[in-house]
Image: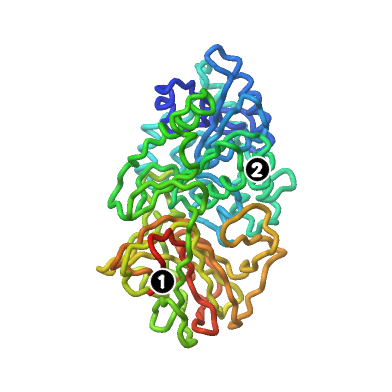
Amino acid sequence: MAWPRARGVGPAFAQYGYAFMAVEIRGAGASFGTKTSIFHDQVAQDGGEVLDWIIAQPWSNGAVGATGISALGLTSMFLATGRHPALKAIAPRFTVFDVFHSVHPGGLLTNRFLTDIGANLRAMDSNRLADAIKPAVARYLMRMLVRGLRGVDEDKSGSLLAAAVRDHAENEGFDRDIAAVRYRDDQLPHSRIEATLDTQSPHTLADALRASGVPIYAYGGWFDGAFQRDMIHLYLNATNAGSRLTIGPWAHGARCYSSPVIKGKRKPDFDQAAELVRFFDLHLKDIDRGVSEEASVHYFTMVEEQWKEATSWPPPGTQLLTYHLAAQNRLLAEPETSALDRYQVDRSATTGAWSRYGKHLTGGFGPAHYPHRKAMDRKLLVYNSSPLERDIEVTGHPLVVLTLCCDTPDGAIFVYLEDVAPNGHPLVVTDACLRLSQRSVPTTVPYQHLGIWRSGRRTDLQSVVPDQRMQIELDLLPTSWLFQAGHTIRLAIAGADADNFVMVPESASAPTFTVEHGAEQTARIDLPIVPSEPLAAT
């Protein structure tokens, strides 16, 4: 099995009878060469040579699988497009399908993530791992305790490693390109060839992924940035026989249990290595440990804290439950008389450094969480339902439609679906964000997409005329959550996430939003419900 530098899974796979290989791309780790911003063809070519070497070994049965987290999951997809006959299955985990949408959700730049990942990449490329750590004491301890990159066995003097690291000085920074562009059709400024973020996006390679014929196990977590949506779209578009989808209560890499109802830091109970072994056993060894008899989709419903399965995504039978925004900060089953609410954006509003877009995306060891949410909601415009009379399971892609005005030439809007306990404590269920000038919805979608697809192209910008009414749609990131009887459904609206996103507008004063609602102006949230009985909002 080829497994690009996965964390600690080598021994776990070895105990199941697999040969384990950690493979670096050119210009990374102890490898020679330089990384390029556009490395799809490079991975497919170099990966083919690696696969040739693997199947020539006496311990190989000629069947190879590949997997990895984040960028390494991306390379497993690139490897599959090479259509090497030895590659029998891949499992991309916690990674991207549409790069622009993943790191510019709603057209907004995830600056914390890109700043942190850039520091990590530069530190690894230069073999100065401690440079990525900001606190001086922690940086000193890192230098004392971590040896750095490991060279090949025959490199006793370290000269080969030193030469390889010198090559890395010419690496193109894909993270810098992501951070530099603002629109999908912007050219990548650090690439030596003409390229955009789509040039490196698996969604543009969907035909090649399907042509490879390899089963693809898309694997992600509900609080993993916007990547869980990408894993769903990978599953929907790379429709090879034997493909699967699993989404669990995790943030990036599944280091911790991230269901918000779990207090403190806790490792996942789920044996992820064993689950992936079952998948690879079927396709690499022809050993079926019940995989072929299972439904292809597995997902975890938070609060209920239960795994569930479905034959497709969204789960069959899903219905919509609609709440309308109303006066006095209410959510109602039916719209009332037209009214409006004014909201002065509080630029200090934030989801914190450990939310879905926070530190865990760059290797943090804690769960994703939204601290001090009760106090933070006082800075937002909120709408609440009456306490629920029964349990409601929301599973799928919620949709928010708003009619609003903004008094600045551009702005950002953040929307949070929250679960408020009887004691008044809210938990964030899921969220969405949008740069208002990127609100237009094209009629042509380049791949099967659930929710609202926006091009993000500069050519599709729609100007924001101050104080002119706009209708906008925001599809919240997919989730599966049980709202319990007695709890309240809350919709919270913000205009900033100070810890994680670039401000819009960056230099102007904070915008004021005017949200209109009532019989004549659409303002609602549609919740996808897995019903146990007929539905009605209250």
Indicate the amino acid at tag 2. Answer: Ser
Query: In the image, residue 404 lies at what x, y percent?
Result: 54, 78
Query: In the image, residue 473 lies at what x, y percent?
Result: 56, 69
Mark 2 or mark 1: whose residue is earlier in sequence? 2
Q: Is residue 60 left or right of residue 183?
A: left
Query: In the image, residue 346 lies at what x, y percent?
Result: 44, 73
Q: Is residue 349 in view?
A: yes
Q: On residue 536, which mark appears? A: 1
Residue at horizontal 66 percent and vertical 34 percent from the top:
212
Indicate the amino acid at tag 1. Answer: Ala
Q: On residue 333, which mark appears? A: none
Query: In the image, residue 461 lies at what x, y percent?
Result: 68, 67
Element on which disc 1 rests: loop
| In front: label 2 or label 1 | 1
Q: Which residue is mark 2?
A: 37
- Residues under numbered marks 2 and 1 in contact, where contact means CB atoms less than 8 Å apart: no
CA gap, disc 2 and disc 1: 50 Å
